[in-house]
Each structure stands twice: as structure tokens, then as C-alpha cells.
Amino acid sequence: MAESDFESESLTDLEETFNRAAKYLQTLVSELDSGQLLAFYGLYKQATVGPCDTPRPNWYQVQAKQKWEAWKNLGDMDRETAMTNYIQGIARINPAWDAEEMKAESSQWIVFSKLSYDNVELNDEDKTFLDWIKEGNAAKVREFLSSEPALVDKPDEEGMHPIHWAADRGYLEILDYLIKSGANVNSRDQYGQTALHYVVSCDHVDAVKYLLSIGAQSNITDNDGVTPKEIANEQIAALL
């Protein structure tokens, strides 16, 4: 086998493992702090896009600026190193993640998730409505709302409504179900931001299109007077 063929094959294996790791991370999002999530975001962008060459967001674009910095700080790190560091980061949280991910792919369910910060196992019955939204479990979201419809617009202690969490993650199915269950598409969090602010900031293009299609207002300003369009990239700004 030629050296170039070997390198190509190795890169393919690395990419496959990286893709599994990125998928597995979705089961951990409710357990990780913002610093960890930002670090994974930066590595993901570095691995999939390359070095950051986008302009620095304005100072008032808090979420966008934090994500930009996490990516920009990686400098000229090559894609392979970014993927490797991403995979190693997942392994530090759960050394058995790859086996669990492959098992989950075959069984389509996970019995429990492991809380990385205190090594306590969180059983499914202990998870809240918001936990299930953060994990992207649409079936559990429907189950909770069928028994407690008022949860659809109940904010958490930080002022974020369920629709904000679904928008932050880009979960279209859950967003659609929350809206159809009575969630206010223009609900504002403690910073005055709507779900549209969230999906725009996180570059969830399909979610932006969906929210606009069901009446999300693109001219709502947050507490700093910023509209979704002002924090959008060029592609999304065109939609707004």
C-alpha cells in the first residue's frame, strides 16, 4: 500500500471516530458546563471548517463572541489534531464512550447518563423535562407535556424557556412540538433574547427557516437593543 493510501485510510478512520464522538456529545450536553461545551465547539469548528477566519463579533454579542474566541484561540491547529483532541476530550469524560455509542446505535436507547462533575449516575426517572429537551429526546418531551402541559412555557431559574433550550441545540422536531403545544415562539429570556436570537447565534440554519415560517419576529431587540439579524452570519442574514 502506498503511503498516501495509508494516510487517506487513517484519516477516514479518524473522521469516523470523530463523527461518533460528536454524536455522543449530544448525550452529554446537559451534564457539561459552558466552558467544556465551548471547548468542544471550538475543536468541532476547527476540525470541520479549519482555522477561524471570520470577523470578531461585537462586544454585545455575548454568546457569539465566546464561541468565536473558543475557535479563534486554536490558531492554525490542523484538522487531524482538532479531531484527535475532540475525541480525547470525550474519552476523558467517559473512557468507555465509544463502546457505549456503538451499543446505543444498535439498541437506540441509553439506560442512564453519567454526570462528569460528580460521578453520580442520573437515572432516567430523575431527569426533568428540560433534561430531556437538552438531550434531544422528543418522545420524553411529548410524554412530559401530555401529563403537564404547563411546562411548555415554564422558564428555568436562569430565565430560559423550553423553546430557548431546544433552539440552542437546534432540535427541530422538539421546537415544532413545543410550538404546536402552545409555546410562545417569541418568548424572551432574562436577556430579552428570543428563540430566533438563539438559532441565529448558533448557526442553526434549518431552525432559523422554521421559526421564520411560523411567525418568529426578526425585529425583536434584546436588552442591549440587538436584533437577530445583527448577530447573523451572511447566509442567515439573507434569510432575515
Image (spheres, rainbow, N blue to C red):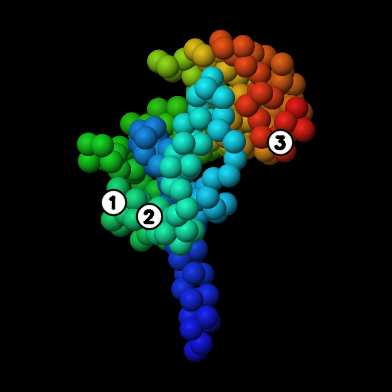
Q: Of the residues tagged 2 and 3, which is closer to the observer?
A: 3
Measuring 51% from the left and 30% from the top, which residue is drawn there?
A: 65
Q: Quadrant of the C terminus?
A: top right
Q: Is residue 106 left or right of residue 115?
A: right
Q: Mark 3 packing: few (<14 Cα in 10 Å), some, or many (20+)?
A: few
Q: Amino acid at mark 2?
A: Asn
* Residue 179 quadrant: top right
Whether 216 is drawn above or below 134: the answer is above
Label disc, if present, on residue 22 of the rendered structure: none
Which label's residue is closer to the chain start, 3 or 1? 1
Of badges 1 and 2, nearer the viewer stands 2
The answer to whether 132 appears left or right of 91 in the picture is right
Q: Which residue is mark 2?
A: 85
Task: Determine which residue is flagged by label 1.
Answer: 92
Which residue carries the number 3 mark?
234
Q: Position of residue 226 (x, y in %)?
A: 62, 16
| Residue at (56% x, 24% y) in the render | 58
Q: Position of residue 145 (x, y in %)?
A: 53, 25
Mark 2 neighbour class, 10 Å CA radius: few under 14, some 14 to 19, many 20 or more: some
